[in-house]
Image (cartoon, rainbow, N blue to C red):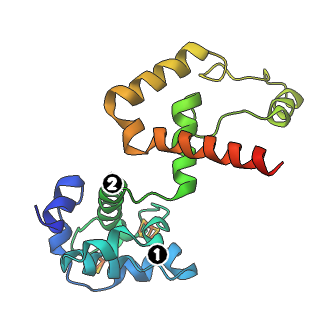
Amino acid sequence: MDFVDLIKKAGGPNVQSCYQCGTCSGSCPAGARTNYLVRDIIRKALLGLKEECVSVTELWYCTTCYACTDRCPQDVKPTDVIKAIRNIAVAEGHMLSNHQKVAVKVIETGHAVPLDKEMWQQLREKVGLEPIPPNASANPWAAEEVKKLSEICGFDKLIGYEEFLKAEEEKKKKKKKEG
Ligand code: SF4
Ligand code: SF4
């Protein structure tokens, strides 16, 4: 399957309607502050330049604000195209390390941003809330179920969970060795 067909299948079915008007990039708050150009990524995708799309850090600068999707005259839905390319990128092993860390948190705690610091619990108490909210943080069985689900659906493999754990173990050993 060529790259354009992969994108269409992964959630960007209208990608080939793009006629490169640039309205998306002109509307893009991420592009106003960085070298990210949504129009450029779509152009490269249409040319079949897969590596140039999936391996660049800029692919992750989109904030999914949907301004481009609101304004695209061709109904390309550029946000969805970017998300489709991101899905392809992750499936092919291109994932930013900070995103991988967040994904690991989801597997291990059931939350992308768990309340795993005492300070946050104290802040909650300060405003009259229970220190630990009644979600997976307070229910270890729920966190276990999230872990099981991640195994069943292959999320753990997708994000390289085992490899992440091994790398962390190696880091710890190295640190211990260095004293
Ligand atoms: S606004 Fe739509 S048609 Fe114009 S360049 Fe962006 S994706 Fe293509
Ligand atoms: S959804 Fe992404 S690409 Fe589109 S305007 Fe917002 S930040 Fe830019």
Furthest residue toward left: 1
Furthest residue toward front: 177
Q: Amino acid at mark 2?
A: Asn
95 relative to 137 in the view: left or right? left
Rendered location of residue 85, percent (x, y)? 31, 62
Task: Indicate the quadrant where residue 121 lies.
Answer: top right
- Indicate which disc residue 12 carries: none
- Indicate which disc residue 28 carries: 1
Rendered location of residue 174, percent (x, y)? 70, 49
Residue beneath label 2, please? Answer: 87
Q: Split into 4 quadrants, where in the image is the N terminus?
A: bottom left
Q: Nearer the viewer, residue 160 or 10?
A: 160
Q: Is residue 50 above or below residue 65?
A: below
- Residues under labels 1 and 2: Cα distance? 21 Å
Q: Residue at x 37, y 54 (%)?
A: 90
The verdict on label 1 being within 8 Å of ligand 2 is: yes
Q: Considering the numbered disc 2 on the image, is that residue within a helix, a strand or a loop?
A: helix
